[in-house]
Amino acid sequence: MQGNDIEKLIKIIAKLPALGARSSRRIVLHLLKKKETSLLPLINALQNVADNIKKCPICGNFDTDEPCAICADSARDSEVICVVQDVADLWAMERVGLYKGQYHVLGGILSALDGITPEDLNIESLFSRLNKGVIKEVILALPATIDGQITTHYLLSRLKEYPLKITTLAQGLPLGAELDYMDDGTIQLALSARKEI
Amino acid sequence: MSTLSSKLREFTDLKSGVVRLTLSDFRNYKNLRIESAISPIVITGENGSGKTNILEAISFLTPGRGLRGAKLSDIKRIRRQNEEESDFAGWSVAADIIKNGEEHTIGTAMQSFFKEETDDTHSYDRRIVKLDQQKITQQGELGKYISAIWITPQMDRLFLGGTQPRRSFLDRLVYAFDLEHAKRTANFEHLYKQWITLIKSGNNDIRWLESIEADMASLGVAIAAARREQIARLNTFVEQEPDDVFPNVRLELDGTVEKMLDTEPALQTEDFYASHLAKQRRNILYNDYVDGVNRTDFKVYFQKKNMPAEMCSTGEQKALLVSIILAQTKCQILYKGFAPILLLDEVTTHLDDQKRDALLDKIRALNLQAWITSTGLQNFDILRNDAQFFRLENGKLF
């Protein structure tokens, strides 16, 4: 049986996304065994993040600077904004390294069932940015789920009032996919979004 | 032999069905294995011996919630006093199947997972599905390999009472041909809940409401169109191939959206449906009644008598149900190119001797796999040389 502090730590780690009780015990045991090389650097890193992390007042990204490094980067295209659900989606886009515009993180998607309303999302600040008149294109990069679609339609109905180019990410076959293994809905989408080569 | 009969024969000769079924901790079975033939399979046993549970397990090899529509956790075998809790993770059904002569494996099981919520960590159950040892995320994929049609004693009252069971029955007939239909109906249901919750919460964000209504309208029209297509397919089939014993049916849809599609193009119907929903927002605050594809009724008529099914006798209603199932089965074989598995739970109840023998004879002639349960053997003489017979006693098959 573990002591109270260890038990508490296991419980906290087990509550993190994608982890359960078993993986939490393994992580804690690893940290205890590797105090100098794992536990202390982790405490340090967590403390630094806790002390310095800020939510960017412009786009909603997390960073230690305000505004965040992306918003502050003058080399990026300030006329294009990509709207994403969460910071994880922003990171995914940045990993690709292809997109050089700005971002806007909504912090979730609309869901009446979960009580998430437009007021709970980072939506008004998006329109404040648009009202400045610099933005020429908005890319709606929200999830291809039914709730993601509703949020896209909701934003679209408001964005139509602005003289903007509005785009969404293409939907269809993932790279390396074989048609035979795709579900009918994906094939239908890919077919309707086909392009000339 | 007619062209139609030879085409039916062509596909059923290729054989489709379950050849080995393994249940673990499923309902009353700790472990059960059945090696089955592609033929009628008659399972007899006393009430409560677990006959329907075998049929339910097979129904879980297809997309959806099985023939009882049960909660996943309710299917788990009840733990005996001397058994360890840790040995009771969930239930599973595994099967070796044949689709037109090709072999495949399907496995499905209940898995519990934990999700952190504001107050505490909660446990949820979900169904995982494997096809040929590969985990698949879209249950609908199974429909390409296996299909099942069932008749249960609960369906004896299908034509009486509320519209919901009839609508679900019809939607299942549609899924067999249009695998996307299941996703569409599930998405529509989700949007419907979102819409109702939003209106009841007093949030009057018109743009949000309109976004949901537009998506509901577009999905709703697709659902209505798929239902109309299936009804037309079955009516045409019955018209061309009337049954010699079972009463021929005429099928109709009674729904605002479906009716509008009779005269208007889909895009116009979508616009109408979206504004029709908008006009009904207030209804939700008073009586929860919302007209649309969620209220459509599936009407069945005894063609010769021009009588609605609900006015027919109990026996006639059963015969009408069998008639629909036989037409659907033949349509599936002809247009989908492989035979569905029939799951017939106490199917002979309410049928007279002539119809009972005719049904069993038709199943035999179709040369497909049909799992039939009954409390006794007395009614199955006609199948004695063609069927596999099992007797269930104390959770074991003999």
Image (spheres, grey):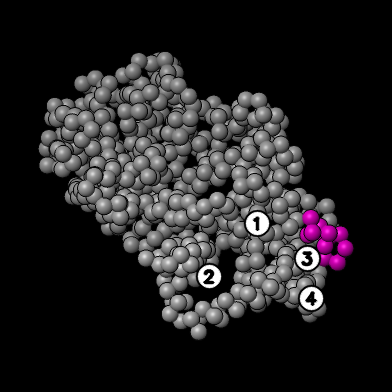
Q: What's the residue type where badge 3 is placed?
A: Pro
Q: What's the residue type where badge 4 is placed?
A: Ala
> Circle 2 sits on which residue?
A175
**B242 relative position to B83: left or right:** right
Q: What's the residue type where badge 2 is placed?
A: Leu
**B386 relative position to A119: left or right:** left
At label 2, counting other C-alpha atoms closer than 10 Å, the crowd grade (few under 14, some 14-19, many 20 or more) is: few
Image location of residue B10, percent across then percent down: 28, 47
In this orientation, does residue B392 appear?
Answer: yes
In this orientation, does residue A185 appear?
Answer: no
For image coordinates 26% across by 52% down, the residue present is: B84
* Chain ID at mark 3: A
At label 3, counting other C-alpha atoms closer than 10 Å, the crowd grade (few under 14, some 14-19, many 20 or more) is: few
Of the residues under marks 2 and 3, which one precedes in the sequence? 3
Label 4 secondary element? helix
For image coordinates 49% across by 26% down, the residue present is: B163
* Chain ID at mark 4: A
Q: Are marks 1 and 4 in contact (CB under 8 Å)?
A: no
Question: Which dot, 3 or 4, sits closer to the camera?
Answer: 3
Of the residues under marks 3 and 4, which one precedes in the sequence? 3
Give a yes or no on whether discs 1 and 4 share a subunit.
yes
> Circle 3 sits on which residue?
A57
At label 4, counting other C-alpha atoms closer than 10 Å, the crowd grade (few under 14, some 14-19, many 20 or more) is: few
Query: Within the magenta stretch, is there residue B332?
Result: no
Give a yes or no on whether discs 4 and 2 share a subunit.
yes
In the rendered image, the quadrant that contains the N terminus of chain B is top left
What numbered label is drawn on residue A108? 1
> Circle 4 sits on which residue?
A72
At label 1, counting other C-alpha atoms closer than 10 Å, the crowd grade (few under 14, some 14-19, many 20 or more) is: some
Whole-number angstrom distance, CA of label 1 to CA of label 3: 16 Å
In the rendered image, the quadrant that contains the C terminus of chain B is top left
Whether A147 is drawn above or below B326: the answer is below
